[in-house]
Each structure stands twice: as C-alpha cells, then as structure tokens.
Image (cartoon, rainbow, N blue to C red):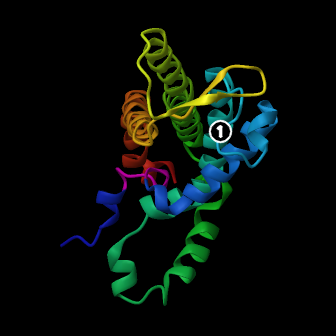
Amino acid sequence: MSGKLGSGLQKKSVTENPGSVGAVLYTSYLQFLGLVHESSSHPTKRAHLPPTFLQTFSAGVCAGGVQSLVAAPLDALQVRFEANEMITGRYKHMWAYGKLKLREIGLRGVFAGWGVSFTKEALGYGVFFGTFEAVKQQAYAAFVARYYDRRLQRGIPSGRVTNHSSRDGRLEVRPHFAIEPVFLCLAGVAASVTQQAVQHPLTLIQNLHYSRLEALD
C-alpha cells in the first residue's frame, strides 16, 4: 500500500460535495438575487413577478464564484492529502495538517488552477439556478394559467377555482396542491442535468490539473 490515499481524492473537488460549502452557495445566491430582482428580497413564498432567467443565471454565477473562492483552500488540502502522513504521526490532528500544509504550499499553491474551478462553479451554478427557477416559477405559472383557463372556457368547474372575484374582478385560481411539488421535482432534475452538461468537460480539465499538482508545487 503506497499510502497515497490522496490519489483517489484528486479526482473530486470539495465543491462537488453540497454539504461542505452549500450554505455559502445558497446564502450568496439569495443575496445576489435580491440585488438583481428586488421582489425576491422580500420574505414571500412566491414573487408576483418572478425573476427572469438572466437574473437567476447572473445570481448563480456570482454565488458559484464565491463558493469556488471559499472552497479553494479546502480543495488544495484535499488533493494533497496522504494517508501515511497521518498514520505515522507526522500530524497530530487534521487542524495541524491543514495549518502546516497551507503554510507549506503558500498562497500560490492554494489558488493554483483556481481559474478552472471558478469557471466551472460559476457557469455550472448559473445554469443550475437559472434552469431551476425557470421550471419552478415560469413554467409552473404558465401551466396553471393555461390549464385552468381552458377549464373555465369549457365551463368545467373545478373545486380549486373559487367562485368569488378578486379585487380586480377576475376569478381566483387555487391550483391543486400536487401540481407545485411535481414542478419542483422537475425543476431539480432539469437543473441537475444542465449543470452536469456544463461542468463535466471542465471537471476533466480540473482532474488533469490535480494529477499534476505535485509537479506544480
């Protein structure tokens, strides 16, 4: 056994694990979305005018960039990890390993290849959030409006369509409770597929960089 457990970790970035830096990603996304779409900054379940694809894409790009910056030191440590260094007692614990290894590789080593990571995360999460919100909000609203409008035109009453008028004189439509969760699931699937389509080629380039990291150091 060579002890280089890190050779297997070189092919996986910390940013590929949603649990590690997901809080930074989602918090950043909400903040940037509130800046480009004022209605999204209010604590409401659904904005009256949902954000456009460009707005959610822009917020996702910014959030992905922030995540790649935060994750850079973690990626640098993970791809250089060697099991025998811990087994032989060179480092007493992981905190000591992180501190000494970051001091050893320096700032240049931490951000070596960060441009590829930034591009991968920024474009990947831009497409992810853009697609997710488009299906979750725009597609959902379009389906509900079209479906219930047709039922009303055909004179088919629905238990989800109220008979009283709203303030502007139009009937209020309360969609079936199962429709929104279906679109939420579709949004997640579509967003994940499009994200992987964008990130996969960049991941291959990133893995190639990680495989040559020792020489770069």
| Quadrant position of residue 119 | top right
Q: Is residue 146 above or below residue 132?
A: above
Residue 77 visible to an observer of this rendering: yes
Q: Residue 62 placed where, x, y %?
A: 68, 37
Point out the stretch of residues depicted in magenta.
10-16
Residue bearing the label numbered 1: 46
- Give residue 89's quadrant in the image: bottom left
Instruction: Tell me which residue sits at (62%, 36%) in the image.
Output: 60
Q: Amino acid at mark 1?
A: Arg
Q: Nearer the viewer, residue 204 or 86?
A: 204
Q: Does 3 appear above or below 171?
A: below
Q: Quadrant of residue 183?
A: top left
Question: At 41% across and 28% down in the image, what residue appears?
Answer: 194
Q: Residue at x 61, y 75 (%)?
A: 99
Left or right: residue 116 compared with residue 181:
right
Q: Please, is residue 4 above or below residue 48 in the view?
A: below
Of 108 and 187, nearer the camera is 187
In the depicted structure, whether residue 160 falls above or below residue 82? above
> Whole-percent x and y of residue 118?
59, 38
Instruction: State whether residue 199 appears in this view.
Output: no
**What element does badge 1 sit on?**
loop
Instruction: Find out whether residue 173 is within the magenta segment.
Output: no
Instruction: Return the residue found at the far left.
Output: 1
Q: Quadrant of the N terminus?
A: bottom left
Find residue 39 and report its horizontal and vertical position in percent: 78, 35
* Residue situated in front as seen by the camera: 59 or 40: 40
The residue that appears at 30% across and 67% down in the rendered structure is 4
The percent coordinates of residue 202 (x first, y second) are: 43, 32
